[in-house]
Amino acid sequence: MKLDKTKRGWWESAVFYQIYPKSFQDTDGDGVGDLKGILSRLDYLEKLGIDGIWLSPVCQSPQVDNGYDISDYQDIYPVFGTMEDMEELIRQAKMRGISIIMDLVLNHSSDQHPWFLEAKKGRENPYHDYYVWRDGTEDKMPNDMGSVFGGPAWTYVPELGQYYFHQFAPQQPDLNWDNPKLRQELYQMIRFWVDKGVGGFRLDVIDQIAKVPDEFITANGPRLHEFLEEMSRKAFCEEGIVTVGEAWSADVPRAQKFSSRDGKQLSMVFQFQHIGLDQQPGKAKWDTMPLYLPDLKKCMERWQLGLQEEGWNSLFLNNHDLPRIVSRWGNDGIYRVESAKMLATMLHGMQGTPYIYQGEELGMTNIRLELNQYRDLEIHNLYAERTAAGYTPQEVMESIYARGRDNARTPMQWTAGVNAGFTTGEPWLPVNDNHSFINAEAALADPDSVFHYYRRLIELRKTHEVFRKGKFVLLLPEDPNVFAYLRQTEEENLLVICNFSDKQQSLEEICVPENAKLLLGNYAEQSQALRPYEARMYLW
Ligand code: TEU
């Protein structure tokens, strides 16, 4: 079903799919995915039924952080293809009812961006103030702020006697949003892409643009909402443009503001509170602990109720920065298929716009590699820092296996053949050996595959209004194994029941009315009790 995308709110019935272009499909044998590769897989995506592709960055970049370091916002990274390829992709996707949602990295640029090359030339240079500088000396930094990827957030430029600020790698200098000229340039650039026909934007670390390093403020700086309103007015001025901001710091009140119904800022944000629940409190993401299911239920409930009337949720368990969910909260052994479907059921029954990350619809899993096979700079920084701090190499590797970003970035598994059909060359990151049985070709041929299950979930969202509008009611909040909830409108009731454990669970405490119809489930035969990782969706 194709949605009318000229009106605000079309995304409330939509499902989006994230593509990490480097790992999706290679067509020229250089081992790196490309735009022509995405073009060649549009039929596959159309079959799945998605309405939009969030495309991770494809702009010109030295690729220090896989394209999240942009050196030209209005040109394409040549390894991915040309501007003509991009235009063709936008056009062909549109013909299939699929919008392209560009990834906008507005918090920082690459240190190879002409603005930064100019900025470094002198304090009087007109571009100097496009970045965030503070005076200092070689041995005295402005303060002791650290960067997300490890090491200090300041890098010294001796010729200027100044430090520039970077929340991420030194090759990703932060842009100075306090400078109105910089903001105008960014808005103009956004208009360039709107004119090319893209359907919307995903905004990288958007809560961090209004930083005030002197006060140690990174997220939610005092001018953040002012900047967002201005950008929305001046750059996203078409009604049908969808915007989703990445906001690690967002809590419910903040997200209500970001995604307020008046449409003054963003359509929705990615919030990460559920993502941190299996992390030891107060520690880093590498310091893991098991998920306690009641925590997840309470968290999801808070977001479902919090944005029900005031705002809009995004729904996701995976992206290019997160480990594979089936390896994380499911079971990537004998119950891989069941648990992948169960996790999808839990998420897709909720209110919001679901995002599927490439390969999630196949139940792709994490990978374990040798240290030197990993490509992510964060992994290598972590290894160096933690071994220096006294962790054993084995301990650090375990953290990397559990949380490393390359888990999500291994090439898409298309076939059981050489390199999973991803490339005829040497893949830039190893292909997971399990492509022999986890691959799109096999999934398409098997009516019970994870793929077809996702396809049905997407279809259901389009068929029943209760998915978009239904009020959320959490059931059994304290049950450590079963996640169950209702969605209700005047006309329809949806009941979602998910067993998060590999043991049988009783269904006695949940009342399933006699007139309820089983819409979808991940086991073929009927049974009284819930089987391992069983999921059911009832409608009446
Ligand atoms: O990520 C923002 C971010 O802070 C995290 O996702 C981060 O990568 C992770 O938590 C580190 O532990 C965005 C992009 O999604 C990511 O790929 C980029 O590397 C980052 O911004 C910088 O642009």
Image (spheres, rainbow, N blue to C red):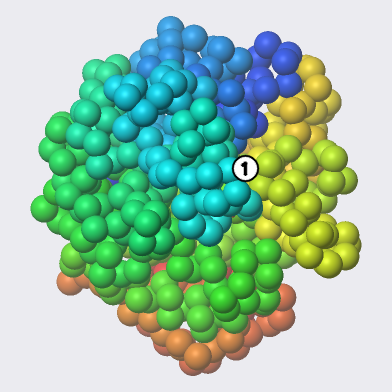
What residue did someone put label 1 on?
359
The one of 492 and 389 positioned closer to us in this rendering: 389
In the picture, measured across the screen, residue 539 lies left or right of residue 382, that is left
**Which percent across, then down, holds residue 384?**
78, 52
Residue drawn at (51%, 28%), measured in percent from left and top? 159
The one of 459 and 173 positioned closer to us in this rendering: 173
Q: Is residue 396 visible?
A: no
Residue drawn at (33%, 31%), measured in percent from left and top? 130
Q: Is residue 191 above or below residue 368?
A: above
Please tell me in which quadrant of the rendered image residue 127 appears: top left
Dividing the image into 4 quarters, which one contains the N terminus?
top left
**Callout count:** 1
Residue drawn at (46%, 78%), measured in percent from left and top? 297
Residue drawn at (88%, 60%), measured in percent from left and top? 393
- Category of crowding for the residue at label 1, using alpha-carbon neighbours closer than 10 angstroms: few (below 14), some (14–19), many (at least 20): many
**Which percent across, then down, holds residue 409?**
66, 40
In the picture, measured across the screen, residue 453 lies left or right of residue 383, that is left
Dividing the image into 4 quarters, which one contains the C terminus?
bottom left
Q: Is residue 134 above or below residue 469?
A: above
Classify mark 1: helix, strand or loop: loop
